[in-house]
Amino acid sequence: MKKYWIGVASNDHVKIGVKEGFAQFGHGKLSPIKRLRNGDIIIYYSPREEMNVKSLAIKGFTAIGVIEEKIPYNPPNPARVKVIYLAYFSPLSKIPGPKHFALTKYFFSMKHSKGMRWKWLQYEAFPKYGPVVRIGPRAVIIADRDMIKEILITKDLPKGQKYEQLRTGPEFPTLLTARDKTFHKQRRQIIAPAFSFKYLNSIEPLIHKCINELIVKLDEMISQNQHTVNIYKMIQLCSLDIIGETTFGGSFKFIENGEHPLPRKIFQELRRRIKTGMYPFLKPFMKQDPYLLNFMTSLIKKRRQENSKKKDLLEILLNTSGGEGGMLDIEVQHQAIEFLIAGSDTTNFSISMVMIKLIQNPDKMNILVKEIEEAFPEFNIDKLPSHDELKHLPYLNAVINETLRLHPINYDVGPGRITTEDTMIGDYFFPKGTTLVINMYRLHHSPKYWGDDVEEYIPERWLDPEKIPKDCFLPFSAGTRNCIGQNFAMMEIRIMVATLIRRYKFEDIPNQDMDIIHFFTASLKTKQYNIKINLRDLK
Ligand code: HEM
């Protein structure tokens, strides 16, 4: 025998016995339908004077009569009522999505656990439900261009609470994870000079130096007849050296020394943060590895002892201490770890994918080789291609854009933005406290905006700006929270790609595992892609 309470109020209820059958509880289309069995009881509150069976809001069942009138109201479990309300009666219930996802956020979290959520979204959810999908009791994922623009730019909604879970120390907001708009604005002003064009120009020789070391290493491997190279790993090591050299005052010397635990530790830490963010009960079992903090502590200590006059990011951060809005050493540590993660994993994946796409498409590679050979007829290892010239090469920029379109580093900006009041966006009403997750991957892969060849790698589409759909390409996000490192990243990508293909001939090794996993950022699941490499015939 089951009891069903209907009508939440403090008045007395009436107790009704029912016969076997089905009943719809409520009037709306989405009202739940329950199977009733002989002997089940409905305890019903009616606001009307006379409480009889006719006045019921429940349809479709046969009453066998009123058993007891005016039984005291015994409220149902409020948590359960809230879950039911949010799932079936809140304004979000009109948004399509898997029905059970409306009950708890864990169904969506489970899709994330192996880094494969993006596949479910791209190939199942968006095609089935459209560009706006409900993924939790208070969460929606969005791939609609105009709505994304409104969220990121026009309304500039604040970041959601989940960003706090991405912090290395919960009490230390960083540029990426800050939620308070005033705090973020102040922090961004402090840090912005380190990403100005003036600063970027001054660090170009440092980027050249690290890429030069990569070339020396690859040349050495070739001279030892070692022609098969894991390009993903080599680029990862070089990206880390670049971030070390340009922002922390000295190369980490990964290329020179080969193996180093740092890349693995960064990946593990990122994964830990995502997992404990999704499943907070795992926190006691997934303790933070002190490696990264220790790494930064000793770096900062060394810098303080050196009393250096270096004008890099670390120096800018350390120099703020004491001033208004200035950072404590501990804050610098957390911010610096963020730069280490944000500045290496991202460029590594992007450069690797640019190279892999070119190597897999030799016809496109040939067009780019021609463009670069014409721009740099003389290749000199001591004078690598300059960014001033590279940034105007149309085909180079086209291949980079096409890769960032197909593989934006943030497939979705998972932690999302939050509505701080009831808000209309497009035709949708979002109650206060709704998390809005932006899906860049779908925006970049939507046939509606890009046409039927959306999944194909066609750098040529970028050569005619008229053909590029407006506001549909956001690899670096948009608005006040866009990527502060984007000019830095583009400079690094252009120089590294141009240098590699000017210096070497590449050959693909087919049938490798190209599965991509996406936690906060995307990466190759195997962390490797082998290619055959040889020196290009230098003129
Ligand atoms: C191809 C390379 C890169 C891509 C595709 C990329 C992409 C992005 C995206 C999509 C965001 C927004 C994330 C969010 O709102 O949750 C972001 C933010 C950010 N990125 Fe990048 N990024 C790249 C390289 C870099 C580099 C090299 C650095 C630093 C050295 C960097 C530092 C940051 C920081 C600090 C933020 C937070 C900015 C803020 O909220 O004010 N990124 N990036």
Image: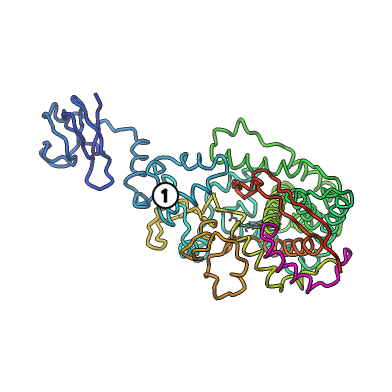
- The x, y position of residue 427, in whole percent, is 37, 62
How many marks are shown on the rendered structure?
A: 1
Q: Is residue 483 above or below residue 51?
A: below
Q: Secondary structure at mark 1?
A: strand
The quarter holding residue 460 reads bottom right
- The x, y position of residue 127, in whole percent, is 43, 54
The quarter holding residue 262 reads top right
Q: Is residue 21 above or below residue 206?
A: above
Q: Is residue 328 visible?
A: no
Range of residues picked out in magenta:
358-382
Q: Is residue 208 above or below residue 91?
A: below
- Tag 1 residue: 134
Which one is in front, 399 or 417?
399
Image check: 491 left or right of 22? Answer: right
- The x, y position of residue 417, in whole percent, is 51, 54
State yes or no: residue 360 in magenta. Answer: yes
> Which scheme is used to colour this image of the protein?
rainbow
Q: Main secondary structure of the magenta part?
A: helix
Q: Amino acid at mark 1?
A: Arg
